[in-house]
Amino acid sequence: MSDEAVQIIARGPRREAEAAAAALEAEPATEALTYSILEEDEDRDVWRIDAFPTTDEERAAIEAVLTRFGALRTVVEKLADADWLAMALSGLPPVRAGRFFVYGAHDKGLAPASTVNLRIEAGAAFGTGHHGTTVGCLQAYHDLLKSRRFERVLDVGCGTGVLAIAAARTGSRIAVGTDIDEPSVRIANENAALNNAGARFVHASGLNHPEVRGDGPYDLVFANILAPPLVALSQDIKTALNPGGFAILSGLLRTQERRVLAAYLSKGFKLHRRLHRDAWATLVLRRAG
């Protein structure tokens, strides 16, 4: 662990911020980095990256990457000596995405009666529902549910489990999530119990784990991960899907959209829809029947 908890903030034009975010994703030393990118001032074209290193090595790697982008103004702020993750989460408002309302324990009393309410506690896992990629996946799923149902759903890189839990809560008989991070799998299973959802989560790398293959092929696959693994998994996701099945892909920047889409089109997928939120893209694809 780092000797002190810090937040690294970089501000600048959208083009530079998106390029820097892509560079952070491509840097091996920051592959597990928690960060966000969003538009801070539309009129002045100011975009902001917030990064939260957990080790001195990760901090050094972030700073080294950001110095390559001269149009960005970078500052490092020390975080208070407290459980800053819990404090940050407690300050996040609930999120509405289509029929889904995602909230933490601190906002339990705000859940409407007319929505599918998902209580998601993050702990050490990614995916509270606030990130643009998670919201994009939930919105895309909401839109698909207007005309069809999905009996079997797989969530690759499940994080807190919010997407598989959303599927289980909206009628999917089988909702399976996988993650390479063991604490995330534990947290996802705890969140499933909190929501009385029949989703289950497996500690696995890739889609070849027996507990993943055994419930396939699937009608829908979520993959809210990063662009490089999305490309690498394109054939495995195709194999995991029934003909005519859907894939909702996110975790990619708009600048990475063309590369990811090309990988899936080459495997016989067709683009059904694309959604944009801040700098992030969500792709809805359909496997050829």
Image: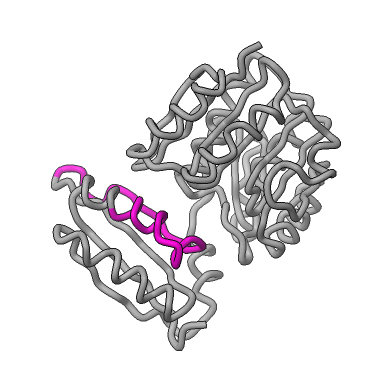
Depth check: 99 or 57 in front?
Answer: 57
Asked if residue 64 lies in the magenta stretch, the reply is no
Residue 119 x, y percent position in the rendering: 67, 51
Q: Please, which residue is most extreme toward the bottom here?
A: 3
Magenta-span inclusion, residue 36: yes
**x then y, percent, for residue 169:** 75, 36
Residue numbers of the magenta segment: 20-43
226 horizontally vs 218: left or right: left
Residue 164 lies in what quarter of the image? top right
Depicted 4 relative to depicted 197: above or below? below
Place of residue 189 in the rendered image (x, y in percent of width and height, measured from the top left): 77, 54
Q: On the rendered structure, is 1 left or right of 163?
A: left
Q: Is residue 228 left or right of residue 205?
A: left
User: Where does the image place residue 47, in percent across and percent down from the top left?
Assistant: 25, 51
Q: Looking at the image, is 277 positioned above or below residue 178?
A: above
Residue 185 occupies which quadrant of the picture? Answer: bottom right
Name the residue rendered at 53%, 25% in the picture: 284
Quadrant location of the C terminus? Answer: top right
Q: How is the structure coloured here?
A: one colour
| x 83%, y 34%: residue | 215
Name the residue at 32% across, 58% down: 49
Residue at coordinates 35% horizontally, 68% vertically from top-left? 62
Question: Residue lying farthest top?
Answer: 289
- 42 or 52: nearer the viewer: 52
- Count of all numbered marks drawn on residues in the image: 0
